[in-house]
């Protein structure tokens, strides 16, 4: 079995998983600290800027549904390498964007590449690390969130050094190139990728799939809004681009730490729900603080909110993979969960922009996400481990 590869090979594969994950968020988190510079150059206003998050998230949702199809037709390895090539291209093209719509076009390329990676990489993790899924998915989630911190911190620094926000976004092509090279060297071949063709329609007839989509979407809606608007929120309060970017980086560090630690803490527990509820409680505290006391202790609020978002992200992935023992089927379920979830998560940043224009501030947006967390708390109660097998039984009645 490929899952029994030598330890040295597994370590190289772990490095590839980490480096690939590191590329999946900087192109979004690097935008917020540079929002004013981008607006001055391209003319994009608040709702137009929201498209730089909304479009990638929509594509992450739509093309996640293509994950099982790509698995069946092209194989996970080839599809992921093609997706990484898109990440290189999309970041590199940002050197020459002169209009808002060109920038949105590069965001679409980057969102498409990210969608394919996110749809297929969890299945590879389930196959290659069957006894350590929680820890490896924790590493994947932590590096994904760490990439968010990297983008939020490095993009404004590069921009201030070079005087050009285009370079502040295009540097990510170098990081994606490294991921492509390591992935080409170490990602496993596709011949042992699964036990048969994956029937997407069969999955979509299961209410549990839709429940997972809703949970994932509500959690990531908070993430997409915070990535888009936390930095502009504090810039409206008088913060500089670098300072607001640092705050977004602190949030991403909290996400990464929680995404890494919570799966480790929950690894001996069959029922992940108490840990998910703890993460959701941290989100409640974070959004409440942003709404009513934003300048009280901003770094603590960002760290707390990040920990809640990162923990939920990683644990929801693991819960989806727990539902099925076959790696290809579990990977397909994860892809579909992301498909519906990211479609839901794409909308809140735009809604918050509309609410901002109507109300003149971000208070209504933070309250909106408090209500979303409340709904998620209720939905998570349905994810009992005893219900996994019955909820995903692939037999029609």
Image (cartoon, rainbow, N blue to C red):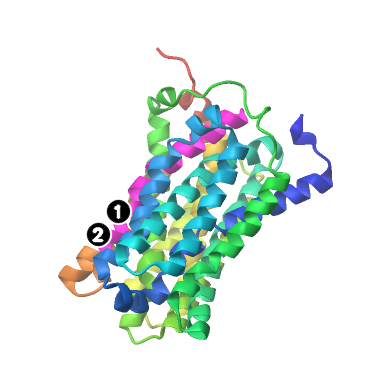
Residue 359 falls left or right of residue 303: left
The answer to whether residue 130 is visible is no
Question: Which span of residues is magenta-colored?
Answer: 324-352
* Above or below for 285 versus 268: below
Q: Which one is in front, 115 or 307?
A: 115
Residue 133 falls left or right of residue 159: right
Residue 267: x %, y % from top left: 65, 46
**Magenta span main SS:** helix
In reply to whether residue 344 is colored magenta, the answer given is yes
Q: What residue is pinned by disc 1? A: 347
* Above or below for 206 versus 144: above
Residue 359 falls left or right of residue 219: left
Q: Which one is in front, 260 or 248?
A: 248
Count of residue discs: 2
Residue 110: x %, y % from top left: 46, 55
Q: Residue at x 46, y 15 (%)?
A: 395
Q: Residue at x 32, y 76 (%)?
A: 41
Residue 126: x %, y % from top left: 64, 37
Disc number at residue 225? none
Number of residues whose C-alpha sits closer than 10 Å to that of mark 2, classed few (under 14), some (14–19) or many (20 or more) = some
Residue extending furthest toward the left: 358
Disc number at residue 351? 2
In reply to whether residue 52 is colored magenta, the answer given is no
Image quarter hosting the N terminus:
top right
Q: Are the two marked residues, 1 and 2, in contact with CB atoms closer than 8 angstroms?
A: yes
Quadrant of the rendered image containing residue 103:
bottom left
Q: Which one is in front, 74 or 58?
A: 74
Q: Residue at x 35, y 46 (%)?
A: 343
């Amino acid at each position: 079995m490929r899952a029994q590869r030598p330890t040295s090979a597994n370590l190289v594969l772990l490095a590839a998983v980490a480096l690939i994950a590191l590329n999946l968020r900087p192109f979004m988190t690097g935008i917020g600290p540079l929002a004013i510079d981008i607006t001055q150059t391209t003319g994009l206003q608040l709702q137009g800027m929201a498209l730089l998050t909304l479009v990638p998230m929509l594509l992450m949702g739509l093309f996640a549904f293509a994950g099982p199809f790509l698995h069946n037709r092209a194989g996970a390895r080839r599809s992921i390498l093609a997706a990484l090539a898109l990440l290189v291209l999309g970041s590199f093209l940002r050197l020459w964007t002169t209009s808002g719509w060109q920038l949105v076009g590069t965001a679409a390329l980057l969102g498409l590449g990210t969608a394919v990676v996110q749809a297929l990489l969890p299945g590879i993790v389930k196959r290659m690390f069957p006894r350590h899924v929680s820890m490896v998915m924790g590493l994947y989630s932590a590096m994904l969130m760490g990439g968010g911190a990297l983008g939020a911190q490095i993009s404004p620094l590069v921009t201030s050094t070079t005087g050009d926000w285009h370079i502040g976004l295009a540097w990510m092509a170098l990081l994606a190139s490294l991921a492509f090279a390591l992935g080409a060297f170490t990602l496993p071949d596709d011949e042992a990728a699964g036990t048969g063709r994956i029937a997407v329609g069969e999955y979509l007839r299961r209410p549990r799939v839709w429940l997972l989509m809703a949970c994932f979407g509500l959690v990531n809606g908070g993430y997409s809004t915070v990535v888009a608007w936390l930095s502009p929120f504090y810039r409206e309060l008088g913060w500089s681009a670098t300072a607001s970017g640092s705050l977004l980086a602190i949030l991403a560090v909290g996400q990464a730490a929680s995404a890494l630690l919570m799966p480790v803490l929950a690894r001996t527990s069959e029922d992940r729900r108490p840990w998910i509820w703890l993460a959701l409680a941290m989100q409640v505290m974070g959004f409440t603080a942003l709404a009513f006391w934003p300048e009280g202790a901003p770094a603590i609020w960002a760290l707390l909110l990040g920990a809640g978002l990162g923990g939920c992200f990683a644990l929801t992935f693991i819960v989806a993979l727990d539902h099925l023992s076959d790696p290809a089927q579990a990977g397909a379920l994860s892809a579909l969960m992301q498909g519906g979830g990211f479609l839901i998560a794409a909308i809140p940043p735009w809604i918050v922009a509309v609410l901002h224009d109507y109300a003149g501030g971000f208070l209504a947006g933070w309250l909106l996400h408090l209500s979303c967390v409340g709904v998620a708390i209720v939905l998570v109660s349905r994810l009992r481990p005893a219900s996994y097998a019955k909820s995903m039984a692939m037999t029609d009645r």
